[in-house]
Image: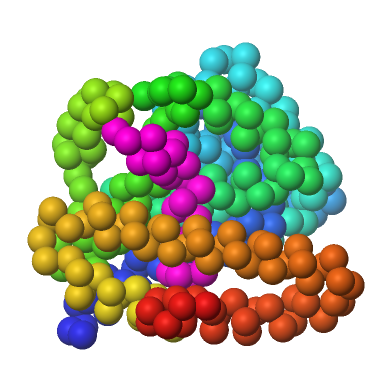
């Protein structure tokens, strides 16, 4: 691997590392008309302050998952929401300020692939947090309302979020194979032609696309977020992808493996919990990786 490729991959994973530090604090602010007044402090709690610059960084991150902008009333609701969260967890906001700003800078200046990955990681994290945090659930519901259907059929809906998940995985496969990733122009063409293509797809293909955001997570955890499994995935791509025509099918194949893995592990977790194995979590981490490795190598369970 040449040095330029190593630098490229290091840059691609920097947003992931930043996001890991960021996820301790919720993000939902969409204030657009911020007036800077010295010292730019919007709220304070003890030694911790929330500034107009902080709100602008959060606005940039929030906008990454919105297909339509918030109304003025929704902006005010979001602003109040984040002010409330700051008062509850001011120290967390201060601790993650630098990481939040760096992540927002990636959204401002990063490549299309990097921006898409960040938006998908934010969306996955928000969905996870929404299971227990009402404020994040409010934001997730807001995001869904601002991602209208691009195509729908029989209760299956595809929005910009699912399209982003699809392209995020396709771009990873393409770059790994040494092929060019998608562009704004190619994505626009795909979206424009998508409703007609979606209507003609087989039911199982429609389901995959309607769950493309979830399948993005399945491909990343466990496959791309574990070094050993990622190496196997890279070898799989090099073996099966010989041109742009192979990218889509290989990305869906890797997603399928991730879906199968996570489905079986979820059942395994359920079974272990049912029999009262309190040491399940410790053992399952090793079992998970061993299982996925065997699956990639074609050795079965």
Residue at the spot x=70%, y=31% of the render?
138
Residue at the spot x=55%, y=22% of the render?
145
How far across and how far down the image is residue 111, in percent? 28, 53
**Farthest residue toward the left?**
243
Q: Nearer the viewer, residue 228 or 116?
A: 228
Is 118 on the left-hand or right-hand side of 197? right
Residue 163 in view, yes or no: no
Q: Would you place residue 160 above or below residue 293 in this image?
A: above
Residue at the spot x=27%, y=79% of the render?
235
Residue at the spot x=85%, y=77% of the render?
277
* Displayed quadrant of residue 144: top right
How far across and how far down the image is residue 65, in percent? 47, 37
Q: Would you place residue 144 above or below residue 43 in this image?
A: above
Magenta part of the chain = 201-225
Q: Would you place residue 255 above or below residue 261 in this image?
A: above
How far across and how far down the image is residue 139, in percent? 64, 33
> Magenta stretch containing residue 206, yes or no?
yes
């Amino acid at each position: 691997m040449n040095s330029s490729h190593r630098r490229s991959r290091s840059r691609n994973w920097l947003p992931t590392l930043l996001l890991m530090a960021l996820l301790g604090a919720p993000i939902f602010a969409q204030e657009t008309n911020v007036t800077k007044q010295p010292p730019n402090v919007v709220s304070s709690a003890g030694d911790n302050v929330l500034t107009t610059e902080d709100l602008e960084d959060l606005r940039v991150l929030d906008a990454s998952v919105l297909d339509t902008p918030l109304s003025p009333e929704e902006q005010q609701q979001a602003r109040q929401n984040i002010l409330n969260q700051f008062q509850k967890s001011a120290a967390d906001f201060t601790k993650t300020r630098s990481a939040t700003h760096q992540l927002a800078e990636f959204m401002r200046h990063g490549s299309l692939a990097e921006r898409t990955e960040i938006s998908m990681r934010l969306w996955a994290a928000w969905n996870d947090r929404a299971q227990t945090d009402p404020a994040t659930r409010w934001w997730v519901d807001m995001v869904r309302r601002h991602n209208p259907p691009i195509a729908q059929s029989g209760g299956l809906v595809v929005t910009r979020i699912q399209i982003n998940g699809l392209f995020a995985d396709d771009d990873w496969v393409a770059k790994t194979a040494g092929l060019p990733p998608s562009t704004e122009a190619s994505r626009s063409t795909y979206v424009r032609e998508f409703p007609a293509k979606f209507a003609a797809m087989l039911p199982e293909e429609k389901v995959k696309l309607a769950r493309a955001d979830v399948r993005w997570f399945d491909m990343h955890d466990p496959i791309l977020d574990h070094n050993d499994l990622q190496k196997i995935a890279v070898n799989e791509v090099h073996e099966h992808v010989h041109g742009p025509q192979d990218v889509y099918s290989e990305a869906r194949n890797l997603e399928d493996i991730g879906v199968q893995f996570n489905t079986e592990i979820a059942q395994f977790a359920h079974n272990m919990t049912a029999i009262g194995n309190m040491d399940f979590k410790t053992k399952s981490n090793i079992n998970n990786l061993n299982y996925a490795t065997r699956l990639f190598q074609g050795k079965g369970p």
